[in-house]
Image (cartoon, grey):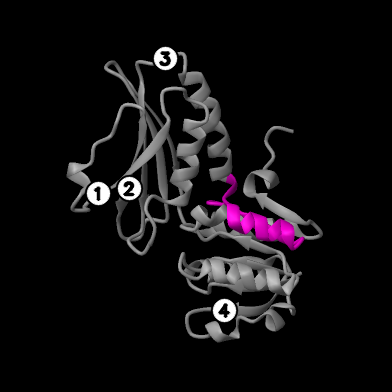
Amino acid sequence: MKIALLGYGKMGKIIEKIALDRKHEIVLKIGSSNPHDLTAENLQQADVAIEFSTPSTVLGNIETCFKAGIPVVVGTTGWHHEMAQIKEQCEYGKNSLLYGTNFSVGVNIFFHVNKILAKLMNDYPYYDVQVEEIHHTQKLDSPSGTAITIAEGIINNLTSKAGWVNILTGDNTAEDANVASDQLLIESHRIDSVPGTHTVIYDSEVDTIEFKHTAHNRNGFALGAVLAAEWLQDKKGFFSVEDMFDFNK
């Protein structure tokens, strides 16, 4: 399989190594030094694109993939307010896109169990719940896309929560933030050299239940992205990582 890498930072380089180990070929690498090389013509050298760039460039990159008719796996977060529009473009143009806030196998197992746990906790309303996420200081968006997916899994399955609110610790407005009882707090921390830690905390007067995923490095995310590119081959439509990790079958 011939792959175009859109975003050639730390994650892009790890994806490259894993793709090569799996006998794929990298035919195009787009980073901050050569954005002008991202053209529909250049993309057509590839069978699929893997997009891990920035929130400010991801939408343009997706649209260029659509123009080229190239399937694209999108791991960049911070653009999901535009998802309905991108889905419409994808389906109208008979293109192929698979997005995910996190492609790690372990995290997607975490997502699935998180929903089951939230349903179970409906029977125990004296527990309140919040989400905590910790990432490296270079992460540009807050909360993390993974934390949002975790929060949505709780909100969709726990009747006491209707929405989420984010507090970034260290931010000047954090101390003044008010969290209503029907809002799920996502508390974000930015610490050097932390690939990603996510914790769901159910707390009561008598005890605390913690459900936690800790990434040791970025390799799991990168492997999942390559697996997604392999899965997307010969498919048309707009997919999420949940379609690839189908735990309900």
Residue named by callout 3: 124
Kind of residue sitting beneath label 3:
Tyr
Residue 17 visible somewhere in the drawing: no
- Where residue 162 sits: x, y (%)? 43, 30
N-terminal of the pair, mark 1 or mark 3, is 3
Kind of residue sitting beneath label 2:
Ser
- Where residue 132 sits: x, y (%)? 35, 41
Q: Residue at x 48, y 69 (%)?
A: 10
- Secondary structure under badge 3? loop
Q: Residues within 10 Å of mark 2 (few under 14, many from 20)?
A: many
Indicate yes or no whether the magenta region holds residue 13.
no
Kind of residue sitting beneath label 1:
Thr
Kind of residue sitting beneath label 4:
Ile
Residue named by callout 2: 188
Give me the C-alpha separation between circle 2 and circle 1. 6 Å
N-terminal of the pair, mark 2 or mark 3, is 3
Q: Is residue 86 left or right of residue 179?
A: right
Quick check: 197 above or below 34? above
Q: Residues within 10 Å of mark 4 (few under 14, many from 20)?
A: some
Give me the C-alpha separation between circle 2 and circle 4. 30 Å
Specify the quadrant that holds the C terminus. top right
Specify the quadrant that holds the N terminus. bottom right
- Where residue 235 sits: x, y (%)? 79, 56
Label 2–label 1 contact, CB within 8 A: yes
Q: Residues within 10 Å of mark 1 (few under 14, many from 20)?
A: few
Give the magenta range: 84-105
Residue named by callout 1: 169
